[in-house]
Amino acid sequence: MKISLRPHHFLCIKGYKGLNYNEVQAANWENVALLLKNNPQTDIFIMNGRDDLCKQCPSEIIKHKAYCKENVVSGLDNQVADFLGILSGKVYKYSEILEKLNKKMTLQKHKEFCSECCWWKKGLCKDSFEK
Ligand code: SF4
Ligand code: SF4
């Protein structure tokens, strides 16, 4: 099985705590997060734009701009891809990505990436990369 993900979602998955915009989106994220946790050898296709986690998102379905502005999250995707040294259009094992994340990410860097996100402001992701 192959999953398509945009780069910044690796940060989100790492600290995912089950909260989301609605139940449908929560179930979608729960499925993917659980699959990756139980099967770290899963192939991940790195992509730009709306990915498998965006498909059920109210931001995508009803174009609810309050949740997510594509130009903002695309910028974050580019920053995270550069930081991790991963390329859009390539396939990686999830375990490879996780190894890079655990090796490189710091609390300060995470704050730099995420301080404008609503979930960060709610305090939900601040401990995602505590050692
Ligand atoms: S703060 Fe937002 S963008 Fe950053 S990891 Fe959490 S949910 Fe994802
Ligand atoms: S908020 Fe934006 S980036 Fe996040 S899942 Fe929804 S559409 Fe995708």
Image (tube, helix red, strand yellow):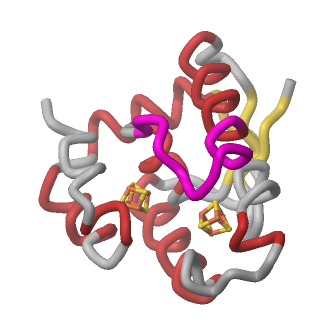
**Horizontal arrangement in the rendering, residue 76 relative to residue 41 (left or right):** left
Can residue 66 be seen in this snapshot? yes
Q: Residue furthest top?
A: 38
Instruction: Please give the name of the residue rendered at 69% of the width and 73% of the height, measured from the top-left corner.
Output: 59
Q: Position of residue 101 (x, y in %)?
A: 37, 40
Q: Is residue 80 above or below residue 107?
A: below
Image quadrant of ligand 2? bottom right
Q: Magenta stretch containing residue 24, yes or no? A: yes
- The quadrant of the rendering that contains the N terminus is top right
Can residue 89 be seen in this snapshot? no
Depth order, front residue of 126/102: 126
**Horizontal arrangement in the rendering, residue 105 relative to residue 86 (left or right):** left
Q: Magenta stretch containing residue 21, yes or no? A: yes
Instruction: Please give the name of the residue rendered at 53% of the width and 51% of the height, measured from the top-left corner.
Output: 20
Q: Position of residue 37 (x, y in %)?
A: 54, 18
Depth order, front residue of 84/64: 64
Instruction: Please give the name of the residue rendered at 50% of the width and 46% of the height, measured from the top-left corner.
Output: 10
- The quarter of the displayed image where residue 38 is located: top right
Please report the bounds of the magenta region as a residue range. 16-27
Q: Residue furthest front?
A: 23
